[in-house]
Image (spheres, rainbow, N blue to C red):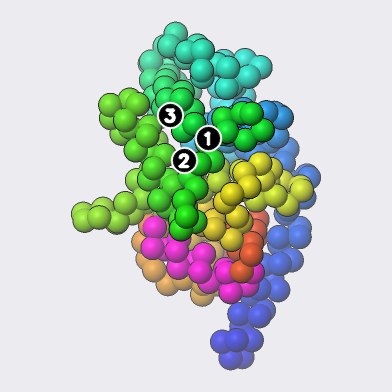
Amino acid sequence: MDKEDKMDKIKEYLEELVAKNNTEAFIKDDPVQFPHRYSDIRDIEIVSFLVATIAWGNRKMILNNANKMLDIMGRSPYDYVMSGGWEKLDPDKCVHRTFFGRDLKYYCRGLQASYEVTHCVRNDKPTLENIFFNEEHDVWKGIQNFRDLMAEANGATSKHISNPSCEAPMKGSACKRLHMALRWLVRNDGIVDLGVWKRLKPKDLMIPLDVHVARVSRQLGLIDRKSNDRMAVELLTEHLREFDTEDPIKYDFALFGVELM
């Protein structure tokens, strides 16, 4: 079997997995269920970033802790952020694993400042989309802009907001959790991803790369880079664009579900 035939087989296999997993049944056991609970774009944005930020480790623990975190924020996470309700948080209270009250305060303070400085409005409501949008449609630049705004508001950077910079000595983080939040906000498949942002397009997105997706991709011959970093994300995404130029990140629904051999 030549390389082209092999890639056709891999694409066919991944398409089958996308069809299997990209269903309403997927939502109830995935963190994407949380932004689905809201209708206001600002609540959806805030919940997407916060829940994605704590989406690592045991799946059941993630869902339980996300529920608890959102209970603290009440009916409208946006109102909670903008009213400063987070100021009363116990900085030492564990929210999820190494994410504590102080980290939630950091995030809320940064989000509050971001809404105040972006001056981006759609349908008479401010939205964070313009922080991430640029003329180059470069989501890495958008992530860096978001990280810088959060750091400026707090006077420091946070380990919970990954650094995409490739400037020496940095190799550039894969920014898995931020790319996952962007997938929820940008893709609009009418089923799982909400697609409330319109300026960024699905073709602009990068694959959320974790250890499992990286291992599966290497096993399938989609990447051979050993590091799970920004370059690996770019290489894998470029390969997935060969399968679907307009929506390469739909294959996230396939790669996460492949069982390693």
Residue 239, position in %: x, y? 53, 71
Marks 2 and 1, the one that precedes in the sequence: 1
Q: Are marks 2 and 1 in contact (CB under 8 Å)?
A: yes
Say which residue label 1 marks.
120
The residue singled out by tag 2 in the image is: 131
Q: Secondary structure at mark 2?
A: helix
Q: Which mark is residue 117?
A: 3
Badge 1 marks a residue whose secondary structure is loop
Q: Which residue is located at x 21 percent, y 54 percent?
A: 169
Horizontal and vertical percent position of residue 69 = 55, 22
Q: Which corner quadrant of the image does residue 202 belong to?
A: bottom right
Residue 37 position in % (x across, y down): 71, 29
- Evaluate whether residue 259 shows in this view: no
The amino acid sitting under disc 3 is Val
Q: Work out how far the residue at label 2 is from the one at label 1, CA to CA, in angstroms.
A: 9 Å
* Nearest to the observer: residue 140 or residue 228: 140
